[in-house]
């Protein structure tokens, strides 16, 4: 055993010296390799953690949301629909939701204005999300002016702030009383944005949704399961940026592997020839080349994964911010819980380390089986 | 420093490999510890979702169909006019709700 370990140590010594002889090329290769692993791991960690967090927090989303659609547009929901929906067997409660969007022209930002049930403040008071506060540089006790639908200016006092820890959910929220909401948007009594239903048995959700569509054909029910499924597939690898990143990374790997598999340089072939001529076995040459591939790929993999972890969970994926922000003026500041599994790291390992190491060994094996005399010449 | 230079390259390599393995263990421990510590914060977020009856996360705020992704409908692609091209960057980052991509996912 000790002899085997000594042999491996000597081989690693030789491999490292060999790599250091081509220092410039190998460092450049290592940097590119690390960057590819870093990007792939960052995307994987970020999307998985975001999906898990959404799946956990949205478990308490309304069981069924019922929207009204007229001519393909979302319409205000008459509150007399409440009685019809409450009559459906299995529905235990139906409540109107009042919410909408407000474009704040001076801030050039879109806010989500909501009038939650049991809003604990008086008319003229609002609660705002941390993103809104940051955008306006305001705090509790300050005032905000809004242009109502009838053209009048409405003044609101900030009574409280929504917790910064929940910014991923509440960054752009402005909470107001129902009266203020109706005044701001000019929505008459007897109408709501949509309805939220509670049901007795969650397994009956799809049956109840079908009954709603049949009873009120101009409505569209959205179940909690559908909300959760939406976020489970939100960053699918088959679509958008995921596909672009995956395609770019795969292409980079194809180039790296092709460079290795297409053959060795004359210098490398000569090196193998000399090793064979001085008595090295073909298996020893393959072991050297295996270590060569393993040193580069394992160290690049480790550096890429660790840097990605720090990037996503310590710097809140700061490099992705410009991409995710898009045209948004508000972007939530949030720290994701590191939902990292062994499965993710293993998948990444098999995607990146194995192909490269294999691509290093194959041409060396071919070169090692050729007559050493021919190699050196 | 002199000691470092005198070391065999393989010793430095295996020491680095051991350090890397240790860092991976630290990463796994940190992930597991954070998941336990953040449970309370996640519960608080669930309470907020229940209290305000929220349906979506506020990751994108540029277009309404990405701000409230789960509330988007089959008319969303045609909100401007029937042949309008997608022009919000965030629209190309996320997948449409799965219910809309099924053949019977009508409005």
Image (spheres, coloured by chain):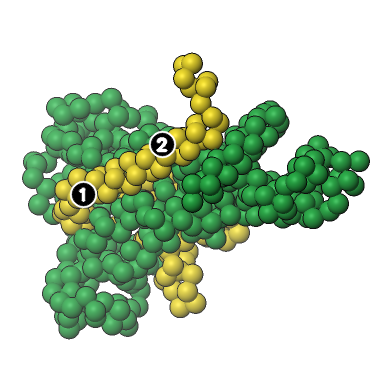
Chain colours: A green, B yellow
Give coordinates of residue A140: x percent, y percent.
Answer: 16, 29
Letter of the chain that mark 1 sits on in the rendering: B
Precedes in sequence: disc 1 or disc 2:
2
Which numbered dot is residue B19? 2
Give coordinates of residue A136: x percent, y percent.
Answer: 30, 27
Q: Is residue B18 left or right of residue A39?
A: left
Name of the residue lying farthest toward the top: B2
Give coordinates of residue A10: x percent, y percent.
Answer: 59, 39
Which numbered dot is residue A247? none
Q: Secondary structure at mark 2?
A: helix
Letter of the chain that mark 2 sits on in the rendering: B
Mark 1 neighbour class, 10 Å CA radius: few under 14, some 14 to 19, many 20 or more: few
Measured Cα–Cα span from mark 1 to mark 2: 26 Å
Mark 2 neighbour class, 10 Å CA radius: few under 14, some 14 to 19, many 20 or more: few
Residue that appears at 24% across and 80% down: A204
Which numbered dot is residue B36? 1
């Amino acid at each position: 055993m000790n002899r085997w370990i000594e042999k491996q140590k000597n081989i690693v010594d030789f491999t490292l010296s060999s790599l250091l002889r081509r220092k410039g090329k190998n460092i450049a290769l290592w940097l590119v390799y690390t960057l590819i692993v870093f990007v792939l791991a960052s995307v994987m960690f970020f999307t998985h953690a975001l999906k898990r967090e959404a799946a956990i927090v949205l478990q308490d989303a309304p069981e069924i949301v019922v929207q009204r659609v007229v001519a393909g547009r979302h319409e205000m929901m008459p509150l007399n629909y409440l009685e019809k929906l409450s009559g459906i067997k299995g529905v235990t409660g139906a409540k109107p939701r009042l919410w909408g969007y407000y474009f704040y022209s001076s801030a050039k930002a879109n806010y989500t204005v909501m009038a939650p049930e049991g809003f604990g403040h008086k008319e003229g008071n609002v609660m705002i999300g941390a993103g809104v506060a940051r955008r306006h540089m305001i705090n509790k006790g300050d005032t905000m002016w809004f242009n109502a639908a009838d053209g009048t200016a409405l003044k609101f006092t900030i009574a409280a702030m929504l917790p910064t820890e929940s910014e991923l959910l509440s960054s752009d929220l402005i909470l107001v009383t129902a009266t203020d909401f109706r005044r701001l948007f000019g929505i008459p009594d007897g109408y709501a944005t949509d309805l939220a239903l509670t049901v007795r048995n969650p397994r009956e959700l799809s049956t109840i949704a079908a009954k709603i569509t049949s009873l009120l054909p101009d409505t569209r029910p959205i179940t909690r399961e559908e909300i959760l499924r939406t976020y489970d597939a939100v960053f699918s690898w088959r679509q958008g940026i995921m596909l672009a990143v995956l395609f770019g990374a795969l292409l980079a790997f194809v180039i790296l592997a092709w460079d290795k598999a297409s053959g060795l340089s004359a210098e490398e072939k000569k090196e193998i020839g000399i090793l064979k001529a001085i008595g090295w076995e073909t298996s020893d040459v393959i072991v050297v080349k295996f270590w060569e591939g393993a040193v580069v790929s394992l160290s690049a993999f480790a550096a890429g994964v660790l840097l990605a972890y720090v990037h996503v969970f310590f710097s809140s994926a700061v490099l992705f911010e410009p991409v995710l922000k898009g045209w948004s003026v508000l972007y939530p500041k949030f720290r994701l819980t590191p939902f990292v599994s062994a499965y993710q790291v293993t998948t990444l390992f098999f995607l990146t380390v194995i192909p490269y190491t294999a691509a290093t060994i194959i041409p060396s094996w071919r070169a090692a089986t050729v007559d050493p005399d021919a190699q050196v010449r | 420093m002199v000691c470092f230079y005198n070391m065999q390259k393989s010793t430095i390599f295996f020491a680095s490999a051991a350090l890397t393995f240790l860092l991976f263990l630290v990463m796994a421990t940190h992930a597991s510890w954070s998941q336990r510590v953040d449970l309370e914060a996640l519960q608080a977020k669930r309470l907020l979702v229940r209290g305000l009856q929220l349906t979506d996360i506020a990751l994108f705020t540029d277009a309404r169909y990405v701000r409230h992704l789960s509330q988007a409908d089959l008319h969303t692609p045609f909100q401007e006019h029937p042949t309008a091209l997608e022009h919000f960057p965030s629209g190309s980052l996320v997948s449409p709700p799965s219910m809309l991509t099924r053949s019977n996912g009508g409005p």
